[in-house]
Image: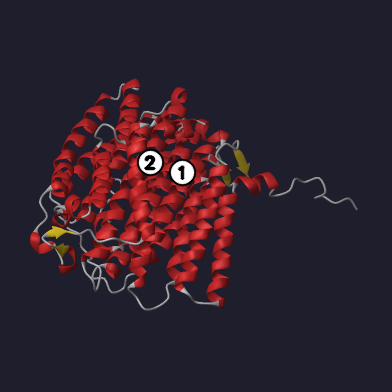
């Protein structure tokens, strides 16, 4: 009897496996980490092993940047854009892993599960950025969400930890339900869950099925808007940012945002949703509300992490403009603008949260200071010049001041909006950016103000001068490296542009 499978193509070829090699390294590393935990419980060992896995995946991912687009079964599609985004994710994870070291060292128990959750978070983000199917998108979304729930509530001794974790869990489950229901509605109309479904665009424009399809699209985008902290789905953001440990807040501000925005952009571009006027109006209202509300609510904030939470809402509103003004003639420029802005946003947030984590470590000898206020930045440049300079570069980039990556990113968005004649969005972006200066500039002034004498500990007072507390050598290397990155990429943005374009 002739075999019916003899001529069938293999499910996964070596080319496909090579295209998703970084994700496979992370998945294999999680399995080995579980075996390592069963063999020997050692915080130092699991930390070094996790760093090695992430660094190996980063090297593999960078080596694949020039590889052509590869369809990996129906679920995944590895292209240059997804690899660039995954590089940002891996760099953020490595930084957060290092900044978690001192935070975890203050506790007695071994924290194997912390590193496992972090690796699972990275794997979920890696699945998201390479997704080409609603099924893989939902799996990556859930893996990322559940990992974050455990990490947000990890610091049980914190006053806000359990509250933040429950709040994030309930709202994240609600967002997942909305998104899953939206996917079901879209599938009921198109009959295909692939992003590249050829029938989706045609069916979308049929009048008798358009309303039902748009309802599914509304629910789907609402679920992703929760992760992106887009208004009016932003209410969880300031509380969770403040209650989570600083390294985890760093992950939410970088990895979660990059992964969710990239998969949203891939889906919208593949399905050509921007062709419909109602969808553009839908996203435009989200963008305007996010830009204005995020910046206005940040004006009165005294807690630094809450201020950055509202700032992230505004920046996601800026990024939505890239999707709104997309067109078939400028898809390459759309990807370039989005990825450059995400790179600038990630670099600025990593710089700021590195300083926040170091301030928490050095603020007291016995324990971390959970709440970092704007007053804690007073005289930071004179107390520890490297920390002050790194914080300054991050704030200037978020504010969009010239000679920073943030300025170039906003310039690309404005350029694309000008080509599309989106004058209302341009006006809103300019007004919102002007409002943001009202809280960014006072923070910069505080960094250069005179340091209060009562803020100096006995170990910092030597002959009336301030002696900077030195952190670990790796943390010092991180600080100076990000200072260099901020200066070089701000003055020479073509380095990033050429990397994205290639």
In the image, residue 119 lies at what x, y percent? 48, 60
Q: Secondary structure at mark 1?
A: helix
Is 308 drawn above or below residue 339 in the view shown?
Answer: below
- Side of 457 relative to 270 (left or right): left
- Side of 124 relative to 488 (left or right): right
- Residue pushed farthest front? 463
Q: Is 424 or 53 nearer to us in this picture?
A: 53
Which residue is found at the position 70% from the left and 49% from the top?
A: 11
Q: Residues within 10 Å of mark 2 (few under 14, many from 20)?
A: many
Q: Is 496 or 189 nearer to us in this picture?
A: 496
Q: CA distance from mark 1 to mark 2?
A: 8 Å
Quarter of the rendering containing residue 470 = bottom left
Which residue is found at the position 53% from the left and 77% from the top?
A: 40
Q: Name the disc covering residue 85, or none.
A: 1
- Residue pushed farthest right? 1
Residue 314 visible from this viewpoint: no
Which residue is found at the position 50% from the left and 32% from the top?
A: 201
Residue 366 visible from this viewpoint: yes
Q: Residues within 10 Å of mark 1 (few under 14, many from 20)?
A: many
Q: Does the residue at mark 1 contact the one at mark 2 (Cβ under 8 Å)?
A: yes
Q: Which residue is mark 2?
A: 342
Q: Is 202 or 404 nearer to us in this picture?
A: 404
């Amino acid at each position: 009897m002739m075999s019916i499978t003899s001529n069938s193509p293999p499910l996964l070829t070596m080319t496909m496996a090579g295209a998703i090699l970084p994700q496979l390294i992370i998945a294999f590393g999680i399995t080995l980490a579980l075996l390592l935990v069963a063999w020997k419980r050692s915080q130092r060992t699991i930390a070094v092993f996790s760093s090695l896995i992430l660094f190996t995946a980063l090297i593999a991912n960078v080596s694949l940047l020039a590889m052509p687009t590869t369809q990996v079964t129906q679920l995944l599609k590895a292209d240059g854009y997804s690899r660039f985004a995954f590089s940002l994710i891996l760099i953020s994870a490595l930084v957060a892993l290092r900044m978690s070291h001192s935070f975890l060292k203050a506790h007695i128990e071994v924290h194997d599960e912390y590193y496992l959750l972090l690796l699972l978070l990275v794997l979920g983000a890696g699945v998201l950025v390479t997704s080409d199917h609603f099924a893989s998108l939902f799996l990556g979304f859930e893996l990322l969400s559940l990992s974050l729930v455990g990490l947000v509530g990890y610091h049980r001794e914190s006053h806000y930890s359990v509250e933040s974790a429950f709040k994030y869990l309930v709202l994240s489950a609600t967002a997942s339900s909305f998104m899953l229901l939206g996917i079901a509605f879209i599938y009921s109309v198109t009959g295909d869950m692939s992003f590249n479904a050829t029938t989706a665009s045609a069916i979308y424009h049929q009048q008798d099925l358009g309303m039902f399809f748009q309802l599914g699209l509304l629910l789907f985008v609402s679920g992703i808007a929760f992760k992106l902290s887009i208004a009016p789905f932003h209410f969880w953001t300031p509380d969770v940012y403040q209650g989570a440990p600083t390294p985890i807040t760093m992950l939410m501000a970088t990895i979660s945002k990059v992964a969710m925005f990239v998969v949203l952009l891939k889906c919208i571009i593949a399905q050509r949703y921007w062709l419909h006027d109602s969808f553009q109006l839908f996203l435009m209202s989200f963008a305007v509300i996010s830009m204005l509300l995020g910046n206005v609510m940040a004006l009165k904030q005294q807690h630094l992490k809450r201020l950055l939470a509202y700032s992230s809402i505004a920046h996601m509103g800026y990024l939505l403009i890239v999707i709104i003004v997309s067109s078939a003639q400028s898809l390459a420029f759309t990807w370039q603008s989005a990825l450059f802005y995400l790179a600038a946003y990630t670099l600025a947030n990593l710089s700021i949260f590195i300083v926040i984590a170091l301030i928490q470590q050095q603020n007291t000898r016995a324990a971390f200071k959970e709440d970092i206020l704007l007053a804690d930045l007073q005289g930071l440049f004179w107390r520890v010049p490297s920390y002050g300079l790194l914080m300054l570069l991050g704030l200037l980039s978020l504010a969009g001041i010239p000679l920073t990556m943030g300025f170039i990113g906003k310039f690309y968005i404005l350029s694309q909006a000008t080509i599309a004649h989106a004058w209302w969005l341009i006006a809103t972006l300019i007004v919102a950016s002007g409002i943001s200066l009202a809280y960014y500039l006072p923070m910069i002034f505080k960094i250069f103000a005179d340091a209060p004498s009562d803020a100096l500990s006995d170990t910092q007072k030597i002959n009336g001068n301030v002696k900077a507390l030195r952190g670990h050598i790796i943390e010092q290397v991180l600080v100076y490296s990000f200072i260099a990155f901020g200066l070089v990429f701000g003055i020479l943005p073509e380095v990033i542009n050429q990397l994205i374009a290639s």
